[in-house]
Amino acid sequence: MTELTDPDVGILRRINNLGDALPDRLEPLVTFTGEYGLPLLALALCALAWWAVRRSPNAPTAVAATLWAPIAAGVAFLANGPIRELVARPRPFLDHTDLNVMLDGKTGYSFVSDHATGAMTIAVALLLVHRGIGLIALAVALSQGFARVMMGLHYPTDVIGGYALGTAVALLLYPAATAALTPAVRWCAARGPLRGLAPGPGEVSAGRPDAGPPAVPTGFPSDAPAASPAVAGTPERGAAPPASEPARSVNPGESVNSVESAKSGEPVGPRVDIPRPDPSAAEGSEARDEVPTAVASGRRPRGRGGESGE
């Protein structure tokens, strides 16, 4: 297996030297973080994701996908057992005794890293549920793999293999896992003690009064049609029409000014009578006007009967 470890040795030594340069008081903190702290943080992110999606519209499915994250990590750990025994790659500090091993007592084979596998499995599964929390979990997984190499417990390819195994388990088994977990979550949420597992958006706290429909904010037009502005001189709808004055006839010989004065109610000055024309006087005027014309033309004027005087 020496030929498999040669490409990793250079990167392994560079990263392991960073741990060797740490102050003595920080080395226990880094060791605890790489062995226990980051795995616990990944599990805490699973709980945070559940809290974030438990009131979503599709709460049972989202909660089932969140529960799949830690379950997938366990499945990947079980799948790693046969792979580890099949490859049988020893730990790097057994072949390179000059490495700074920050945690003693590790036995067993090196490929693939269990810590890197579990962290990446949780990160990929949470990315399918909540993108923000999934990105944080992805950063935790990358830090976990870096810490395992810096502690001198794994080769870089051990970590990369763990990332690949965790991603495959989380993605390939996701449809079947959520299909099986969603009915179980619905069943548990319907029971009293486990109702808070996936309450959904319709859950209302007990004793909360019903506020009723929201009031219409002031300043916005209502649904009722607005009254149109009244036009001058136009009677309002529903009002009685004004009483019209009776027409007043003009008697013969009555002046126009007197009629207008009677309508308006105001005096318009001295009365001036306008006499009506007499039809008989008009005929006499025509006969008189015809005489000069007949004399000028040498004809006699017509008599009353219309006959000429020739």
Image: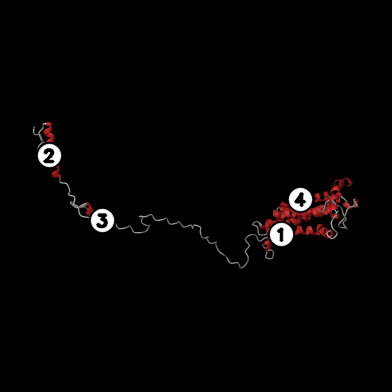
Tag 2 or tag 1, which sits nearer the N-term? 1
Q: Does label 4 or label 1 sit earlier along the sequence?
A: 1
**How dense is the environment of label 3, judged by Cα within 10 Å: few (below 14), some, or many (20 and up)?**
few
Task: Point out the residue furthest to the bottom here.
Answer: 207
Where residue 198 sits, quadrant-wise, is bottom right
Q: Do the CB atoms of the residues marked 4 and 1 lie less than 8 Å apart?
A: no
Residue 3 is situated, as x and y percent measured from the top left of the image, at 88, 45
Eye-nearest disc, 4 or 2: 2
Foreground mark, 4 or 1? 1
Kindly identify which residue carries mark 2.
288
- The residue sitting at the left extreme is 310
Q: Judge from the rendering whether residue 4 lies leftward or rightward of residue 208; answer left or right.
A: right
Closest to the observer, 213 or 195? 213
SS of the residue under disc 2: helix
Image location of residue 51, percent across then percent down: 69, 60
Disc nearer the start of the sequence (3/4): 4
Residue drawn at 12 percent across, 34 percent down? 294
Among the 4 quarters of the image, the one containing residue 141: bottom right
Question: Does residue 129 appear anywhere in the picture?
Answer: no
| Marks 4,2: beta carbons within 8 A | no
Q: Are marks 1 and 3 in contact (CB under 8 Å)?
A: no
Q: CA distance from mark 1 to mark 2?
A: 125 Å
Q: Is residue 43 above or below residue 167?
A: below
Tags 2 and 3 in contact by the CB under 8 Å rule? no
Asked whether 69 or 174 is in front, the reply is 69
- The numbered mark at residue 263 is 3
